[in-house]
Image (spheres, rainbow, N blue to C red):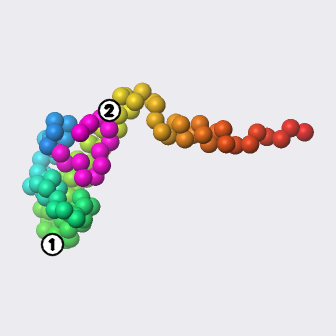
């Protein structure tokens, strides 16, 4: 997996260097990371997080763990975006889309 590219949801908890370093910053989420790394077939990361959120309604420690996951996700996604931006050097599909939109506009009528 190329960690510079922003990951898909299922890849956000890979035990690779970049993500492992992110987990070191937020140790409180470590007890629930295995649930998010080994998701059963037919389930999504979002579904597992939703189940954990239901547990958090009656478990204050689970609440704290999920807050740590939120901070972890913010940190990892921002880091991936920064690394991808440097690697792409500003050449993205968004820049091309904006150029296509600019060209599709009709020039103003001259009177």
Name the residue at 15% across, 72% down.
Answer: 58
Q: Which residues are magenta?
A: 1-14
Name the residue at 24% across, 58% down.
Answer: 45
Mark 2, other Cα within 10 Å: few <14 / some 14–19 / many ≥20: some
Q: Is residue 61 above or below residue 29?
A: below
| Residue 79 occupies quadrant | top left
Can I make out residue 22 in this image? Answer: no
Q: What is the chief secondary structure element of the magenta stretch?
A: loop
User: How far from the left and from the top, in percent, is residue 90?
Assistant: 45, 30
Q: Is residue 44 left or right of residue 105?
A: left
Q: Which residue is mark 1?
A: 58
Q: Is residue 6 magenta?
A: yes
User: How far from the left and from the top, in percent, is residue 64?
Assistant: 17, 58
Q: Which residue is mark 2?
A: 83
Q: Quadrant of the C terminus?
A: top right
User: How far from the left and from the top, in percent, is residue 65?
Assistant: 16, 57
Name the residue at 20% across, 36% down.
Answer: 18
Tag 1 or tag 2, which sits nearer the N-term?
1
């Amino acid at each position: 997996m190329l960690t510079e590219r922003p990951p898909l949801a299922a890849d956000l908890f890979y035990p690779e260097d970049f993500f492992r370093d992110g987990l070191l910053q937020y140790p409180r989420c470590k007890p629930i990371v295995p649930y998010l790394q080994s998701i059963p077939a037919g389930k999504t990361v979002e579904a597992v997080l939703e189940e954990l959120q239901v547990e958090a309604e009656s478990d204050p420690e689970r609440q704290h763990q999920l807050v740590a996951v939120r901070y972890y996700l913010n940190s990892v996604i921002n880091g991936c975006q920064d690394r991808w931006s440097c690697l792409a050097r500003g050449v993205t599909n968004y820049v091309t889309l904006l150029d296509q939109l600019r060209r599709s506009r009709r020039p103003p009528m001259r009177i």
